[in-house]
Image (cartoon, rainbow, N blue to C red):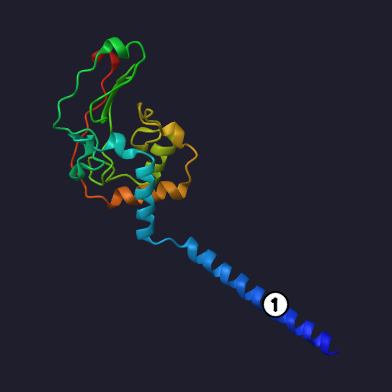
Amino acid sequence: MKKMNFFLLFGAFCLTLCMGSCTGNQKSESESQTVSAEDLVKRGEYLVTIMGCNDCHSPKRMGPNGPEIIPELLLSGYPMDRPVPKFDTTWTNKGFPILAPDFTAAAGPWGVSFAGNLTPDATGIGTWSEEQFKRAIKQGKFKGIEGSRELLPPMPWFNMTDIKDEDVSAIFAYLKSLPPIRNIVPAPIAPNEM
């Protein structure tokens, strides 16, 4: 009888521990589903960094180790006060893409394209909804507008068609947290106008 009581008490103790552990896990799971705005922005910054968005969308200047991002122009796209570079069409006509020295402009068989302004200024994504941004990223639609043209190379939107919506939200939150930079990026140039 004493043995039976011991096993019953031990079993009840283990069950209590297990239930407490499970309840604790459920609480932490629901708590982890609630992401603070600060955490969302940090996640977005992380994604923008590892996805290489700065490679094309941030103007650069030459430093001792090559092109360096100009911090005050972070993610503002091809600078509107910069002359449009001349590209050798000998190569672009053969299908070779050519990048401007700081990678904010590119030329190829499609013509010349310029990296867009991703800051929250009206000349960037300042008036965009998150849904527009999602459409631009996942469907490659210019300005995220249904029925608009596709984003031009070298924007790799086709690599992001399966990006999770929560990651798009994080990227959008980060971009909206940046200082707005007024920068009207030039319109693309058609191949026959290069």
- Taking the view exactly as shown, the residue that stands out farthest to the right is 1
Q: Where is residue 36 in the image (x, y as percent from the top left)?
A: 39, 62
- Taking the view exactly as shown, the residue that stands out farthest to the bottom is 2
Residue in the image at 30% along x and 35% along y: 55
| Above or below for 178 versus 118 | below
Q: Locate the C terminus and report the quarter of the image it occupies.
A: top left
Residue in the image at 19% along x and 41% along y: 70
- In-image side of 147 versus 8 (left or right): left
**Amino acid under disc 1:** Cys
Q: Where is residue 188 in the image (x, y as percent from the top left)?
A: 27, 25
Question: The residue tagged with tag 1: helix, strand or loop?
Answer: helix
Q: In which quarter of the image is residue 26?
A: bottom right
Q: Which of 117 and 28 is in front in this view?
A: 28
- In-image side of 38 versus 23 (left or right): left
Q: Where is residue 106 in the image (x, y as percent from the top left)?
A: 29, 24
Category of crowding for the residue at label 1, using alpha-carbon neighbours closer than 10 angstroms: few (below 14), some (14–19), many (at least 20): few
| Above or below for 16 versus 92 | below
Q: Where is residue 179 in the image (x, y as percent from the top left)?
A: 22, 50
Q: Locate the N terminus and report the quarter of the image it occupies.
A: bottom right
User: Which residue corresponds to mark 1?
Assistant: 14
Q: In which quarter of the image is residue 69?
A: top left
Residue in the image at 79% along x and 82% along y: 7
